[in-house]
Image (cartoon, grey):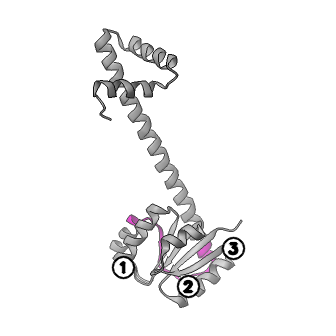
Amino acid sequence: MAIRVLIVDTKNERSQALEQALAEAGFDVVSTVDEQDDLYVTMEELQPDAVIVDAALPSRDTLEHLGQLGRRYPKPMIMLAEEETPDLTQQATRAGVSAYVVDSISPALVRSMLNVSISSFESFRALKGELSRTQETLSQRRAIDRAKAMIMEMHGLGEDAAYQYMRKTAMNRRMTIHELAQELLSVTGNKGK
């Protein structure tokens, strides 16, 4: 199945060349829209796999808008521009642009940049997911450790005995150790993460 690409364009003559290059490279251009169109509705309706923004010199507003769009509909975004400055490149990266390209549009270049951008985007998304899971696990571990310390203090138990007590209680109540820890911490008013 071909990768579905949405083109957001400010210059109609360049978008026609871009559409042709994408088609020759084997991509499916689902639509070409103006940056003034409602991109949220377009993203919701068309659900493209990637977005190419063709702007001669992207404005701060355009980049801000792309950042908001990327947070709501995370997709690989490629910016095609006629000019490049270090400041503009940094702003585009902060807005979620995967690739910032200042060059002519050949099918080989388009295929390469889309494939690299999609791969990079997916790797970044996987890393963010892994980071989120790791942070959640760490948060749970901290809650368990705080609850265990409370039990050690309240019952005069050692660390292993307190953990075994929590484990047995959680099993008997058909809950996870983390759920038990959260319950203990909320009952005592010690809810901090």
Closer to the eye: label 1 or 3: 1
Q: Is residue 101 above or below residue 184?
A: below
Q: Position of residue 185 (x, y in %)?
A: 33, 26
The quarter of the displayed image where residue 114 is located: bottom right
Q: What residue do we see at 28% from left, 28% from top?
A: 190
Which residue is tagged 2? 15
Q: Amino acid at mark 3?
A: Gly
Q: Position of residue 133 (x, y in %)?
A: 47, 41
Q: Amino acid at mark 1?
A: Ser
Decide which of tag 1 and tag 2 comes sooner along the chain.
2
Decide which of tag 3 and tag 2 comes sooner along the chain.
2
Mark 2 neighbour density, 10 Å: few (under 14) some (14–19) many (20 or more): many
Mark 1 neighbour density, 10 Å: few (under 14) some (14–19) many (20 or more): few
Q: Is residue 131 left or right of residue 118?
A: left
Which residue is tagged 3? 26
Q: Which residues are magenta?
A: 93-111
Which residue is tagged 1? 59
Mark 3 neighbour density, 10 Å: few (under 14) some (14–19) many (20 or more): some
Q: Is residue 143 left or right of residue 176?
A: left
